[in-house]
Structure formats: C-alpha cells, structure tokens
Image (cartoon, grey):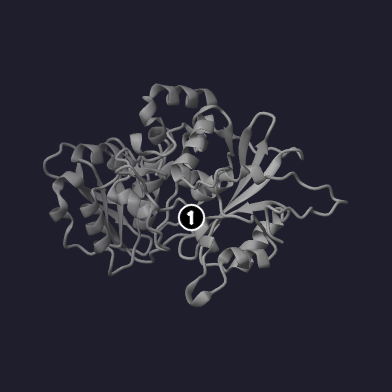
Amino acid sequence: MAGNQLGKSWAGAFECAIHLTGKYPDWWEGKRFKKPVIGWAAGETGEVVRDTIQRLLLGRVEPWGTGAIPQADVISADSALGTPGLKGVIKVRHVSGGESQLTLKSYNQGREKFQGETLDFCWFDEEPPIDIFTEGLTRTNTTQGPIWMTFTPLKGMSDVVVRFLMEENPDRSVTQMTIEDAEHYSPEQREKIIASYPKHEREARTKGVPIMGSGRVYPIPEEEITIAPCPIPPHWARIVGMDLGWDHPTTAVWLAWDKDTDTIYVTDAYRKSETVPAMHAATIKAKGGWMPVAWPSDAGSHGRDGATPLVEQYRGHGLKMLKDRAQFDDGGVSVEAGLMEILERMETGRFKVFAHLNEWWEEFRIYHRKDGKIVKERDDLMDATRYAVMMKREARTKPAPHKPINVNTSWVE
C-alpha cells in the first residue's frame, strides 16, 4: 500500500515473474514453488492491465523480454479478446523444465469471471472490489498459495483495506511505502510531486495513507507534526500513557513536555499483544522506571472471579502507576475533550512525534470516525497518547542519579 509511482507495481511484477520462472533470488524469504505454477494477475480494466501489468511483465512492444520475465523464458503470449494489444494467457518456462501459465484479468469483467479455477497465486494491481478479492482468495485455498495486492488507497477505508488494517491475522501483512522511501526521486523532486497534488489527496498519493476526508480524527499532514529523534533535555517533564489489553495490544507511549514552550513530544511507543503484565512492566521500566504512568478506568476494575485489578498488578511489578485513572483537572474523562486538546496542539505546532515511531504512525494514519463515532480498532497507541496528555500535570523530571525518587502522592508505591 503505497503512493503513486513509487515502485509498488514494479515490485509486484517481479514477485510474479520469480514464481512463474522459479528463479528465486538467494535472499528471497517468501513462498517458493518447485514446480510450474498457475496464476492470475488482475487490474481495473483491460486497457489498464495492458499498460501496467503486461508492460511490467513483458515490456512495451514485441518482441517480449524487456520486462520482469526474461526474454528466454517467454514461451508465448496469446491475445485476449476485446482490448487491442492485450494478452490473455502468458506461458513461461519454469526452471524445473515445465511451463507456468499466467492469465491476465480485469475487475470490470465481474466476479463471475473470477470463479472456478484453482490457482497457485494471484496478484491484484490496484485495489479490487471485495467480492473479487474474496474469489481470488478462494482460488488459492487448495494450494495455500499467496495473494498480494499493490495499490494506492484512494477508496479510503474500503472493505478490503479494513480487512488488512483493522482485522489482525497472522496470515496477512501490510507493507506501507511513502515517497520518502522512493530513492529514485531527489528531495527537490519529492517536494515538487507533493505540491502538485490537491491537499486532500496528498497523503494517499505520496504516503499510501487511505483517504478519509472528514472522517480522520486528526486531519493534519504528517510533516507538520513530525520531528527527527533528538536527546531529551533533563528539565523536560516526562510521563507514560498506557492502554491495557490482551487480545488487543497493551500499549505504552512516552511523552516529554517542554513547559517553556508548552510543547509535547511523543518520544517512544510500545505495542504488544497476548503478553503478561510482568513482561510489559519489564519493558517499560527499562525505558525509565521513574516515570509516572497514566492508565484508563477499566484497568482499575476487578477481573473475573475477583482477580486483582490490572493497575495493581502493574504496581506490584514496580511501575509508578498514578493514583487515579486518567482524567482532567476537574475530574472529567471526556474522550472528545482529550482529542480536541491534542488536535489543537497539532494545529498550533505544540505537538510533535519522533519520525521513527512506525507503529504510532500506522495508527495515526487510520485513526478515523464512522458515522461520527471513533472506530475502536487499532487505536490503542492513540488511546495511550490521550491518557498521557490528560495527565500531563503529573509529568516529572528525571531525578538526579544520587538522589532517591521522591514518593509523590500522585502515584502509589
């Protein structure tokens, strides 16, 4: 999932070619087929498939062999009906001695044209409708072969995007690529390309961030809040925000508060699922066990059968959990108030995030509303950030090495 003209389709074409030929690079860690394969490659329309997938695999014009599939391995390329210049079936020589076969298809043929076949792999170039995606997935059930997509998420939080970004599954993964990763552009070219797009499309077309429009919780360009990692001055106050879970991740976000400029910096982030409190606590303590920790209200509740509340468990493991749940000075716990404070800080240059915090940025990019309500999926780091901001008044500076940490009534020892 990447911006336009960054190399995603090129990468997809070369994966397709190595499966068809069986000529895997030594560094390849993905699926390997030891026999000829049957695959599909599909795009929006016949014209688009001809001009992208076919061009990248075979080359622009005959004789074929200037694309990802070596010329010596192209056995034949039969013409398809209906679209001038489009090939329907490409036969490729496999290193085992047999022939692989790739069929080129288009989404506008409809779901019915994606039924019936048994495939070793399927490549979707640009996002398919969910019914066609599901049919492609079904074609590989028997072989357990891979499906991959290369696309710019201009359709926003579609059913396909939600499946990958919101529904965690060990058999799925998402690789995002931004224009900053595309080293074939110079910094000056990147700036020119970014400026050429309408503002509402820039993040999708240059960073591969799904278009959300008014649905985004923080409709702020990333570059306005991004900062390179830097040392934290000792006089800046520090605090950690935690969101606690099991199936959904336990997360922690480290904040540094420059009170002189009233600017908050997100300096570190942690996210891990299905791990016991002792392990989370050890990780957080290793990054600064003296820091106070803000936590949500449900962490103070007793578990099933009267189990010890999570906040007490973390205290038992040595974290400086604040005495009270995350709340404002007046005792309020409004989610919207917390979001608006962060948004206002972003808009006024008083909220910055270290650039290397990939997991934090992943959540930021998809943090959105549906029908006016926050979508409660993959938002755990966002919640932890809000808790810490709500409790920033309890942030503390790092004690001198020769001094013990003062016992403060804001937390429980």
Of 226 and 374, the residue lying toward us: 374
Residue type at tag 1: Pro
- Compared across the picture, whether 344 is left or right of 69 comes to right
Res 358 visible: no
Residue under the point 45% across and 57% down? 24
For this orientation, the residue located farthest to the bottom is 305
Residue under the point 69% across and 30% down? 260
Q: Position of residue 373 (x, y in %)?
A: 35, 45
- Compared across the picture, whether 9 is left or right of 106 comes to right
Q: Position of residue 318 (x, y in %)?
A: 70, 63
- Compared across the picture, whether 299 is left or right of 403 comes to left
Q: Position of residue 121 (x, y in %)?
A: 31, 59
| Residue 56 found in image quarter | top left
For the N terminus, give its image quadrant.
top left
For the C terminus, give its image quadrant.
bottom right
- Compared across the picture, whether 235 is left or right of 312 comes to right
Q: Residues within 10 Å of mark 1 (few under 14, many from 20)?
A: few
Q: Is residue 60 above or below residue 293?
A: above
For this orientation, the residue located farthest to the left is 82
Residue under the point 48% across and 74% down? 304
Q: Position of residue 164 (x, y in %)?
A: 37, 53
Res 94 visible: yes
For this orientation, the residue located farthest to the right is 402
The residue at which mark 1 appears reads as 25
